[in-house]
Image (cartoon, grey):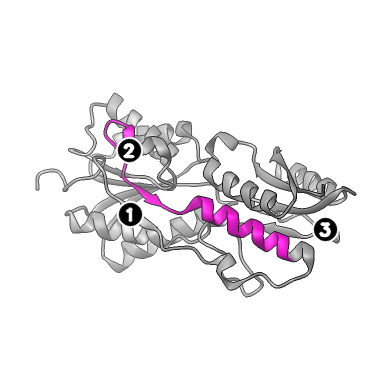
Amino acid sequence: MASVVVVVPEASLYFPARMLSGAAGAAHAEGYRVDVVAMEGTAEARALQLKTLLAGEDIAGILSFVPRPKSAVLDSGVPLVVAGEYDNKMRARGSLADGTAAGKIVEYLASLGHRNFFHVAGPSAWPSARNRKAAYQEAIAELGLNSVGIAPGDWSPGSGYAAGKKIAALSEVTAVVAANDQMAIGVIRALHEHGISVPRDVSVFGWDDMAESSYLVPSLSSVHMDLEALGTRAMRELVARIRGTQATPEALILDPMELIVRESVGPVRGA
């Protein structure tokens, strides 16, 4: 049985398992074995890892949920699909890289009276993180709101916690938009330790709608994507490339993202 390799981030704890499940299911349905590899280290180290994988004789193709290192010069004949990046016309592929929901979050929070925002961004190497940040900034500018600050994160709760400590010192901030749920959780913990109530004092919005989000206290508002479908369709595109056929148009299209509003957001304080 031929194998396909699925590449996930080194910090795979923060990688949505539902996306991997969808990809694996699609591969198995087409008769491929799935090997999962965590991409680790610096950009140079990851480029070398990727080049080594592509040189493998028994690999039919590679599906990567990790951005392709800029330093990677790839001349292998092994098909490679990088989910969440761009096609050859620089259009975001699928929904993983689509950041427009960040603007919808800002609009919704503004409708609750919020004017002073803070963004906890994902790693800049990730197109999804860059696009979410850009959509956040665009909405802030278009609506005449104030972005008090942007903190860099690495998808982990720890980086959200570090950002939360900074936010706690900024009394004007009433709304936080985090690029994923784990960082939002870290923000909420830091605010709690500083006696700042969520959402009474500060509203916090996450992204990914992970399974635990609805069970937190307060339950976390988030962005829902059909991650299983994203994994499935990315794998189907890879299979099409392996077999030299054209991927179906729906392979790159997902249902629109949905804002899931829960207890972590509310009207601006004093409203």
Residue 219 at x, y percent in the picture? 29, 37
Q: In this view, does 216 lie above or below 263?
A: above
Q: Is residue 57 left or right of residue 241?
A: right
Q: Where is residue 181 in the image (x, y as percent from the top left)?
A: 41, 41
Name the spot of residue 26 as percent of width and height, x first: 64, 53
Residue at (78%, 65%) from the top-left corner?
Answer: 243
Count of numbered badges drawn on the protein: 3
Q: Name the residue under label 1.
A: 259
> Tag 3: residue type?
Val
Which stretch is magenta? Answer: 214-240
Which residue type does callout 2 highlight? Ser
* Image side of residue 45 versus residue 221, left or right: right
How far apart marks 2 and 1 lie (CA) works out to: 13 Å
**Mark 1 / mark 3, whichever is N-terminal:** 3
Dot 2: element:
helix
**Residue 214: assigned label:** 2
- Residue 16 seen in render: no
Q: In this view, does 124 lie to the left or right of 139?
A: right
Sequence order check, earlier mark of 2 and 3: 3
The residue wearing badge 3 is 78
Q: Nearer the viewer, residue 71 or 259?
A: 259
| Residue 188 location, quadrant | top left
- Disc 3 crowd rating (10 Å Cα; few below 14, some 14-19, many 20+) is some
In the picture as drawn, the residue positioned furthest to the left comes out as 271
